[in-house]
Image (cartoon, rainbow, N blue to C red):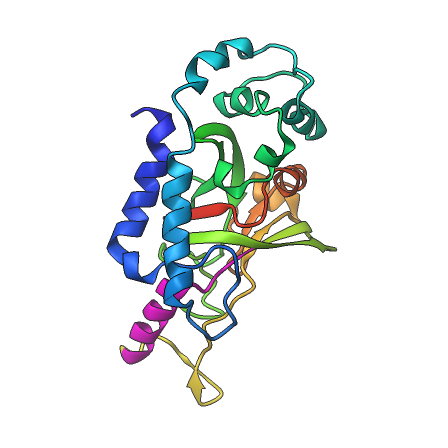
Amino acid sequence: MNRKFLPLCIALQLLVPAVALQAQTSIAPVPGQAASPAAQSQVNSTARSYAFTTPASKTTALASAPAGEPIPDTAGGRLLALVGRTRVSTPGERELVLARDPAELTDPLNWAVTIYKSRHQLIVYYKGRIFRTYHAVFGRYPDPGPKLYEGDLHTPEGVYAIVGKYYNHRWRRFLKINYPNAVDHQHYIQAVDHGAVPDAHGRPAPLGGAIGIHGTDAPWLNRTDVNWTTGCISVDNDAILELDTLLPRETLVLIKP
């Protein structure tokens, strides 16, 4: 399959089964509340818009920045140099260095992240093309599955967006995603109804929150593929600094099993 269409395929797989329940992209939901119908529809529009942001007219232009060539002095080239690149080496990097308008670099529709828990991969796309693949580890619960409630040690699965970027003294930077979204709220209600959520102080454990992408204070655990977090996505410390520099707020984040 052409990698250009990979984000679209992934987005459709996740969006179609729950089109009425998608999470909002630009405003983090108030903890304990589901996103409004208007906000839910916004993420659908964002995902679809992102999937078609690569114009056909750019295809021939890529020849001006082939892989292995020095980085040109463009807005995109300067951003690439800022994160430590000295050569253009991926399709996403080739697309990035063609950007002369700084506004292209901060448009969340130009970026997307796909995360594969079973592969320990976090893949960044720029305008539908693979920018770079990063190594990642996840929640420490040994069995696969989405996050249902606070304390279950699972990493969420579904369609999210980056809604905050913060300094963190333990993990360098923290890129917060909008978990729980409307789909997560629905799954939680169903889990409570089926008795799958344990009691905490006489009532079901809460849904939880504060999930994001961050660095690590135990690099050797990351290097050896040990899933050690309580539900977040952890990458190497140099990677989190790079992701923090590259990814704007509202960037689409797809988390797969």
Question: Is 176 left, or right, of 203 in this rendering?
Answer: right
* Quarter location, residue 36: bottom left
Q: Could you tell me how many numbered marks the image carries?
A: 0
Can residue 228 be seen by looking at this rendering?
no
Question: Is 72 left, or right, of 205 in this rendering?
Answer: right
Q: Is 11 in front, or is 101? A: 101
Residue range of the region highlighted in magenta in the rendering: 176-193
The answer to if 184 sits in the magenta stretch is yes
Q: Is 175 in front, or is 238? A: 175
Q: Quadrant of the N terminus?
A: top left
* Quarter location, residue 182: bottom left
Can residue 76 be seen by looking at this rendering?
yes
The answer to if 12 sits in the magenta stretch is no
**Position in image of residue 240 (x %, y %):** 63, 42
**Position in image of residue 138 (x %, y %):** 50, 51
Residue located 53% across and 63% down the image: 28
Question: Is 173 left, or right, of 38 in this rendering?
Answer: right
Q: Is 187 in front, or is 112? A: 112
**Position in image of residue 247 (x %, y %):** 58, 41
Where 221 sits versus 206, above or below?
above
**Position in image of residue 255 (x %, y %):** 42, 48
Q: Residue furthest bottom?
A: 202
Residue located 32% across and 73% down the image: 191
Secondary structure mostly taken by the magenta-highlighted segment of the chain: helix
Q: Is 112 in front, or is 62? A: 62
Question: Is 200 left, or right, of 9 in this rendering?
Answer: right
Where 57 sits versus 186, above or below?
above
Residue located 51% across and 72% down the image: 31
